[in-house]
């Protein structure tokens, strides 16, 4: 066994740890995004205008319009490895 082997194993362990953290963060992001889009759609249904929704959501009016028109997917990660 070479002296590089422990470094390689440590690197693999850190990669696996980082992937687990990435998966947790991706799931949290997806949940928060789904909730935000649902609230925006609800606001639109209740008659709140795109400008007000944009101001409070941090999105542009144009993006809120795309949400309204069904052009924004609830799935933020369409091709995850």
Image (spheres, helix red, strand yellow):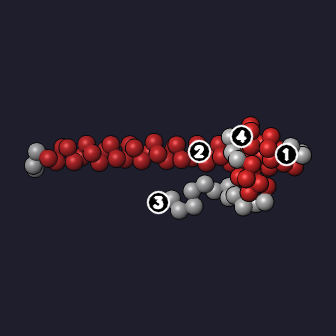
Residue at the image position 71 percent from the left and 52 percent from the top: 63
Drawn side of residue 16 relative to residue 69, left or right: left
Residue furthest to the top: 56
User: Does residue 67 appear in this view?
Assistant: no
Instruction: Give residue 74's quadrant in the image.
Output: bottom right
* Residue designated by label 4: 57
Q: Are the residues tagged 3 and 4 within 8 Å (C-beta)?
A: no
User: Does residue 80 appear in this view?
Assistant: yes
Query: Foreground: 72 or 55?
Result: 55
Q: Of helix, strand and loop, which one carries label 2?
A: helix
Q: Of helix, strand and loop, which one carries label 1?
A: loop
* Residue designated by label 1: 49
Q: CA distance from mark 2 to mark 1?
A: 25 Å
Q: Are the residues tagged 1 and 3 within 8 Å (C-beta)?
A: no
Q: Of helix, strand and loop, which one carries label 4?
A: helix
Q: CA distance from mark 4 to mark 2?
A: 15 Å
Mark 4: give few (<14), some (14-19) or many (20+) Cα within 10 Å: some
Q: CA distance from mark 3 to mark 2?
A: 16 Å
Q: CA distance from mark 1 to mark 4?
A: 12 Å
Residue at the image position 75 percent from the left and 48 percent from the top: 61
Q: Position of residue 53 (x, y in %)?
A: 78, 42
Q: Are the residues tagged 1 and 4 within 8 Å (C-beta)?
A: no
Look at the picture and state if 78 lies above or below 7. Answer: below
* Residue designated by label 2: 29
Residue furthest to the left: 2
* Residue designated by label 3: 81
């Amino acid at each position: 066994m070479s002296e590089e082997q422990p470094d390689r194993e440590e690197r693999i362990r850190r990669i696996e740890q980082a992937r687990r953290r990435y998966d947790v963060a991706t799931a949290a992001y997806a949940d928060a995004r789904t909730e935000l889009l649902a609230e925006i759609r609800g606001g639109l249904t209740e008659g709140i205008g795109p400008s007000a929704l944009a101001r409070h959501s941090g999105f542009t009016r144009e993006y809120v319009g795309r949400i309204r028109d069904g052009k924004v997917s609830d799935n933020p990660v369409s091709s995850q490895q």
